[in-house]
Amino acid sequence: MPKPNHTILLVDDEESIRKVLGLSLTDEGYEVLPAANGREALRLFRELKPPIVLTDIKMPGMSGLQLLETIKAESPDTEVIMITGHGDMDLAIKSLKMEATDFITKPINDDILAIALKRARDRITMRGKLVDYTARLERLVKQKSGRLNVSQQSYRQLFDQSPCYITVQNPDLQLTAANKRFNDEFDGRIGMHCYQAYKQRTAPCPDCPVIATFDDGEPHQSEMQVTARSGDQCHLFVATAPLFDDDGTVAQVIEMSTNITELRRLQDRLASLGLRIGSIAHGVKGLLTNLDGGMYLLESGLKKQDRAKTAEGLEIVKFTTDRVRRMILDILYFAKERPLQTRLQDMHKLVEEIAVTFKARLQDQPIAFEERFTEIPLKAQIDATVLRTALLNILDNAVDACLEQTCEGTKKIVFGLSAKRDYVIFDIIDNGVGMDKQTIDNLFDLFFSSKGHRGTGIGLFVAHQIITQHGGTIHVSSRRNQGAHFRVVLPIAGEH
């Protein structure tokens, strides 16, 4: 027998996904209602009212976004989790703006799905507890007085001990009472309109739950963004209840609000983390595929005593292993801040070591490599280990740009070293596919990648962090199909 809040409407146009995911959810104790499209899902939802909906975002006919919009219009408290592909980031963000609970990416990771479902159940449970608390508080207030406006001092202790923000409002939406917590966070002067206290507005808020309670005499719930006295933005879960006059008229409305700002932030962070983990997983998967190919060639060459095939397989294995190693180092650098261990280093020795490593990676690639190193002796205060990683990450980016370039002509990468006054300058120039302004603006953002599933968005972020940590800067100039120029400028003395 499934537990409460353990019924899920599963919507996906791919039968294989419905079967596999349905079996997994059933094993976890959920009752699963499968639907092959949005129309069938909407019919089941209206008939059975499941508390949780798990739907693909892209489907023929009624899309997942249209299904989300319809469900939220009919049942705002239903928790809807979207299933997205890695190219659907904009749709995923749009779904969150439409009040989706969360989104997870394909291929679906069981742990990430479990976290999303637990969050949905916790939200349902929290709403239930808040409704029960509201009902109990309303009954208590009714027992103490039929008209709160003439005896509000009697309930001051009850108000002030509440963990919620509590106000009492008249039909003009003016505050007739406010508890201590509300006054600590907002301006709770008696007679002030609630929309002035919460949002510094000059008119009532759209879809105000207090107005709805005055209109129909029923409790209402909603979520809203408000501004605290400090200027901070807060996300509140709001519940209202009527306070009746002796003749049964709604004389005032009590409003109880719970601050769920941190819960929202945690939800956003976990959703973002899911995308990041998915991006890294795809990058690792691509490298493992290359490694499998290299191992196949290596084994095949050894069995057939084909030295050319053996050598080709070995090069692929060596190249891929090095990429895996550097990816892991990038992830570790991102995960844990590492203080620099700087020493006075010979810059010529550094760039020559980098060039040797990089030229080995360019074997069998149709890319020319040119070194432009100044002959002037040059030393700088740097952490050579991490700086080498940063420059190799930028050089690898140049390789990808050249391989993507479809125009005819020789593909080329230039690696330069020079100095100007108190600065050492590294130039990395390629004639690859180039970048537009939007790509350049986002180039060093964590997990941003213009390479689709082939990139993780970590390498250039880590490079930027390392250069910044050295007190340096990275300048980028590029245009579509006109190559790119990365210039790294570091202070020789290592000072910020």
Image (cartoon, rainbow, N blue to C red):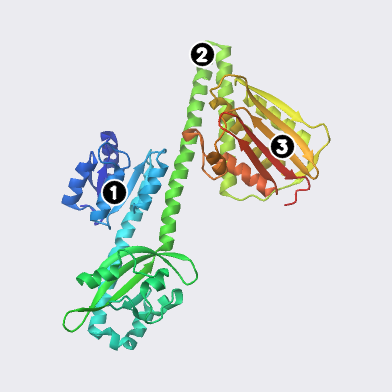
Residue 426 — which label?
3
Distance of label 1 from label 3 (alpha carbons): 51 Å
Q: Which residue is mark 2?
A: 303
Q: Residues within 10 Å of mark 1 (few under 14, many from 20)?
A: many
Q: Residue at x 79, y 32 (%)?
A: 374
- Mark 3 nearby-residue class (10 Å; few <14, some 14–19, many ≥20): many
Residue 338: % across, % down: 64, 49
Vertical position of residue 369 compared to residue 179: above or below: above
- At label 2, counting other C-alpha atoms closer than 10 Å, the crowd grade (few under 14, some 14-19, many 20 or more) is few
Label 2, label 1: how far apart the Cα atoms are: 57 Å
Q: Nearer the viewer, mark 3 or mark 2?
A: 3
Quarter location, residue 382:
top right
Which residue is rendered at x = 41% and y = 38% of the image? 87
**Is residue 139 placed above or below 431 in the rendered structure?**
below
- For label 2, the SS is helix
Q: Left or right of 175: which side holds 458?
A: right
- Give the residue pinned by disc 1: 68
Instruction: Please provide percent x and percent y for residue 360.
Output: 65, 25
Question: N-terminal of the two: label 1 or label 3?
Answer: 1
Please, what secondary structure does the residue beneath circle 1 have?
Answer: helix
Residue 112 visible here: no
First reached walking from the N terminus: tag 3 or tag 2: 2
Q: Is residue 457 above or below residue 209?
A: above
Image location (x, y in percent) of residue 221: 29, 65
Residue in front for this viewpoint, 15 or 210: 210
Q: Secondary structure at mark 3?
A: strand
At label 1, which amino acid type do we have?
A: Leu
State yes or no: discs 1 and 3 in contact (Cβ < 8 Å): no
